[in-house]
Amino acid sequence: MTDERFDRKIHDADPYRPEIAESLAGAEQHLLEEIMSEPQPRRAVFRRAAFTLAAAAVLVIAVAVSLVFRSQPSQTRAIVPPGAAVPEQKQAPAMTPAAWQKLAEEAPRLIVDAEGWKVTHAYGFADHTGTMAFGKGKQILEMNWYPAGQYQGYRKDRDAVSKPEPAVVDGWKGKTVRYTATDFATMLEPRDGVFVELRGQLVANRAAYDELLTNVKRVDVKTWLAALPPEIVTPDKAQDAAAKILADIPLPPGFDPKKVKYEGTNDPYQFGARVTSEVGCRWIAEWDRAKKAGDKPAMDKAADALKSSHDWKVLNDMNAEGDWPEVFWEYSDKIAHGELPVGYKSGLGCGTSW
């Protein structure tokens, strides 16, 4: 099983997800936090999980599976059953620059204002959740935004990591805990409906981490947007970015890319996963429908479309950075061999809001 498939398992029981965080037992959440704390050279979709030891990976899956059965999300997500017709898409109006400006104004905007630090990835910010990571060399400072209602649950867990110590980030009060000698987390108090946790990894020591926090600033919309690299896909750029990705991809029957709504802010890797998920899920559902209907020409068309994914530019571009393409190709190859992939909806995020 690839790292990406492990990541999808963890996503389903991710302690960072607001709907699950409060229901996790402290020991289980702490275990997941610890295993997820190591930086990775390859990217995962949405949350980067480190599984450097096979035993650790098995342990995480055991915990994750138990959490999935114990802690189902509070919001129902529409998932297309195997063989069912794909629901008719509703028109998704493109987000105008003015609408995106308003969304950015409502987001808590923090950046690292120091030489050499730059945004390495960003995603979310369609609501009170989002992630932005800054890097300099091997050092990483990741910022995660969560709804204010989840603050107490997170605080309780962090209090068990180490003795919390007072911290202030640009006038925003919080507490800092230490995971290792080079790994620290600072949780800021709720403000404007959210709270933010900063996670510094591979910093030299506590003094260096504290110094880094003095360079974290809350900025205006113009400055925040300017900090985003041009390749970051914001909602106002999403339709154009999706069109470029889909240029060499065969589209499933009834699929209108202009009716897909891409919310939030995503780096190219996350956005590529989002777009190919939409296509892949629909082609697999179409293949399953055709198989049950005895429609061999439609089955062959779907299988050929998925087989062609090995040549899709977006997946090949992503492959050096993370394992999403490998998982996608694994499912596609199963279809080519006449087998419906078990767990593909979870693995590809079918029917989810991302």
Image: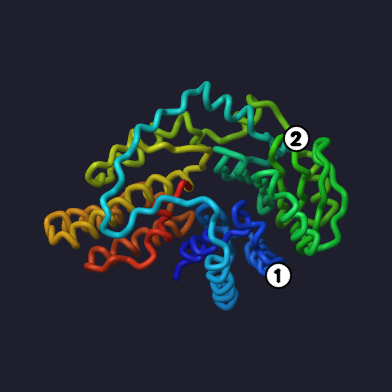
Judge from the rendering whether residue 113 lies leftward or rightward of residue 315; answer left or right: right
Image position, residue 246 (x, y; %): 32, 41
- Residue 153's x, y, as percent? 72, 55
* Rendered image: mark on residue 136: none
Q: Is residue 275 left or right of residue 70?
A: left
The secondary element bearing badge 1 is classed as helix
**Identity of the residue drawn at 73% across and 49% down:** 151
3D distance between C-alphas at marks 2 and 1: 33 Å
Q: Residue 35: give x, y in percent of width and height.
A: 64, 67
| The N terminus lies in quadrant | bottom left
Position of residue 35 relative to residue 349, above or below, is below
**Residue at 70% across, 44% down:** 148
Taking the view exactly as shown, the residue that stands out farthest to the bottom is 55
Q: For residue 188, what is the image quadrant?
A: top right
Which comes sooner in the sequence, label 2 or label 1? 1
Q: Count residues near mark 2 (Cα–Cα under 10 Å), then give few for <14, some for 14-19, many for 20+.
A: some
Residue that label 1 marks: 27
Query: The disc labelled 2 sits on which kind of residue?
Result: Lys
Q: Which mark is residue 217?
A: 2
For the residue labelled by badge 2, is the local secondary structure a helix, a strand or a loop? strand
